[in-house]
Amino acid sequence: MTENALKKELEKICPNCVDGFLDELLRCARLHSSKNADYNGTSELYLVTGVKGRIADVWRKMIRVMTLGWFDNAPKVPNETLLDTTQDLTVYSILLTVELRKLL
């Protein structure tokens, strides 16, 4: 599906959330893709896959969100701001949903 087709579909489903919503999803996907490129073609940092792997991904990112958003003295990770981490969390949540749908 093209980006324009996605936007039209989204307009039908949620006319009040179109502005910025799809753009943010695309930014999240691009960030995820560029970070995965840093792992030399391997998209998995950990060996656990499927639903459990995705739950672990979401959990790790949620801990990071809490750490960055809650504590002023949180350890800094190069190139991973709170915004980056929430974008990662968005992607991992969608990937978890995809894994769960496979079980239906």
Image: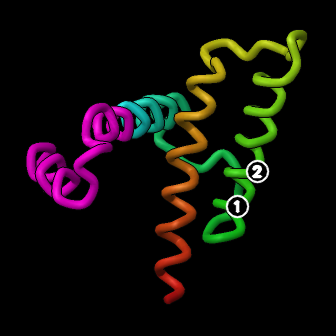
Residue 93 place in picture, x, y as percent: 57, 54
On the picture, is 22 further left or further right than 41? left
Disc 1 from disc 2: Cα separation: 6 Å
Q: Is residue 85 magenta?
A: no
Q: Looking at the image, which is closer to me, 62 or 54?
A: 62
Q: Is residue 12 in the magenta section?
A: yes
Amino acid found under the numbered disc labelled 1? Ile
Q: Residue furthest front?
A: 16
**Residue holding disc 1:** 55
* Local crowd size for mark 1, using a 10 Å CA cut-off: few (<14), some (14–19), many (≥20): some
Q: To which residue does mark 2 refer? A: 59
Q: Does residue 30 appear to the left or right of 64 in the view shown?
A: left
Total labels: the figure holds 2
Which region is colored magenta? Answer: 1-26
Residue 52 screen position, x and y as percent: 71, 68
Q: Position of residue 19 (x, y in %)?
A: 26, 34
- The answer to whether residue 56 is above or below residue 85 is below
